[in-house]
Amino acid sequence: MDSTQKNSITRSKEDYLRVIYELSECNKEVQSSGVAERLGITRASVSRMMTELKSSGLIEKEKYGSIILTENGYKLAMQIKNKHDLIITFLVDVLGVNAVIANKDACKMEHAVSPETAERLSNQISKLLCIKE
């Protein structure tokens, strides 16, 4: 993915990609209705975003068909999901934040954390959790 495409990824697109990734881990076929339910939005909103993600080369989808992440979409979704999980781990295991609150906060924070910060946070969490054990 080139830098101009990366720069065009909005918070909303990141949320969709993460949800598609999460749903694809559970189900072989990801449908727009499942994405809508998970995000708490209408299927019409999902349909509009699927058009955008498809034109960005991040998903493949035929009308009324399953949603499939492209190679670039998968890589980006995995990075977003990993940041999300990392933040949850930090908030819950290090700071002792309630898991429900941590998940809500992670959904907001994942968009602002740079790859460098995420890597350093991961290293620090590993050190802290090893000390606790």
Image (cartoon, grey):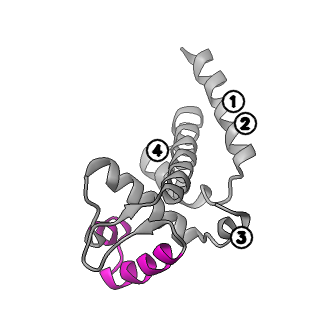
Q: Nearer the viewer, residue 133 or 50?
A: 50
35 magenta-colored: yes
Residue 4's disc is 3
User: Is residue 47 left or right of 94 when viewed as pictured?
Assistant: left
Residue that carries the numbered disc 2 in the rendered image: 120
Mark 4: amino acid? Asn
Judged by depth in the image, the label closer to the viewer, 3 or 1, is 3
100 magenta-colored: no
Magenta range is 34-55
- Secondary structure at numbered mark 3: helix
Q: Earlier in the sequence, mark 4 or mark 1?
A: 4
- Label 3 crowd bin: few (<14), some (14–19), many (20+), radius 10 Å: few
Judged by depth in the image, the label closer to the viewer, 3 or 4, is 3
Mark 2: amino acid? Arg
- Label 2 crowd bin: few (<14), some (14–19), many (20+), radius 10 Å: few
Within the image, what quadrant is residue 9 found in?
bottom right
Q: On screen, 102 above or below 36?
A: above
Judged by depth in the image, the label closer to the viewer, 2 or 4, is 2
Q: Give the alpha-carbon distance from disc 3 to disc 1, as whole Å.
A: 31 Å
Residue that carries the numbered disc 4 in the rendered image: 98
Q: Are marks 1 and 2 in contact (CB under 8 Å)?
A: yes
Mark 3: amino acid? Thr
Q: On screen, 30 above or below 12?
A: above
